[in-house]
Image (spheres, rainbow, N blue to C red):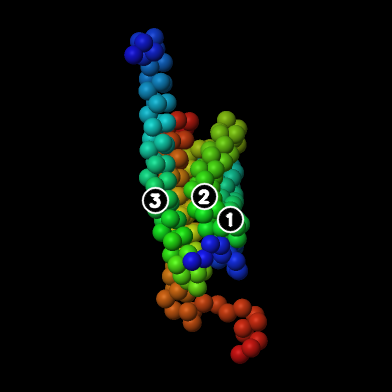
Amino acid sequence: MELLAQIAGEDQIAFGEAVSAGFAYGLAAIGPGIGIGYLVGQSVQAMARQPEAAGMVRTTMFLGIAFTEALALIGFVVFILLKFA
Amino acid sequence: MATRLDGPAPEQQIALDMVKRGLPVAPILILFTLGIWGVNGALSAGYGIALVLLNFLFAAGLIAWSARISLAMLMAAALFGFLIRLALISLAIWLVKDASWIDLVPLGITIIVTHLGLLIWETRYVSASLAFPGLKPSTDHQQHQR
């Protein structure tokens, strides 16, 4: 609170923008992080149990990772547009 | 239970496929951004396309490399790879954000459109070839055997 009290006027707005943008990017990265962890965990289990299906599992796993990562990229793009554009 | 995966790496093939599809489409996207945002937009779009293609190649290389070591390493590489790649993309944009030739709006739009577009294109191909193996293009070796 002391820090907030020291920051006044336009600085407070800039501070709020920076904190919001940081939170937005952080929150946008949490979901894909959980998603990729779950996806890879299940895929590794499937490949360990059925090595003969590993090729198909790896193919779908890689596409799944890339699709999940798209969410983080969208969050990142929104962050750079809010912060710098 | 298998603990490591030897043999071919399908993710590298997928990433190379996406690069092969992305390179011919890149001039169209660059021309499109040139028409709307000018030269800076076109340069930013080119930078964005390069970032997305390198990101795919790096992700595939990391997974293929780690799968040959162990499945636990694959898990670690996929998770930390996600963080490392996000950090690298952030760094790549941070380094050029104040450059005179960069325009952040076309850069951001190009990153999202290229990433999702190439993925959807590749997924359609993979889905078709998994569902109907006859559709999968055969290699030269297989064609000679017929």
Q: Nearer the viewer, residue B49 or B139?
A: B139
Report the amino acid beneath label 3: Gly
Residue B68, can we see it? yes
Residue at mark 3 to residue at mark 1: CA–CA distance: 20 Å
Q: Are marks 2 and 1 on the same chain?
A: yes
- Please tell me whether mark 2 sits on a helix, a strand or a loop: helix
Across and down, in percent, residue B113 comes to: 46, 52
Q: Which residue is mark 1?
A: B66
x, y (%) of residue B58?
Answer: 59, 52
Q: Position of residue A50 (x, y in %)?
A: 46, 70
Q: Which residue is mark 3?
A: A35
Mark 1 burial class by Cα count in 10 Å: few <14, some 14-19, many 20+ = many
* Above or below B124: residue A11: above
Amino acid type, label 2: Ala
Residue B21: x percent and y percent? 56, 62
Tag 2 residue? B76
Q: Nearer the viewer, residue B39 or B13?
A: B13
- Mark 2 → mark 1, Cα distance in angstroms: 8 Å
Contact flag, marks 2 and 3 (Cβ < 8 Å): no
Q: Are marks 3 and 1 on the same chain?
A: no
Q: Secondary structure at mark 3?
A: helix
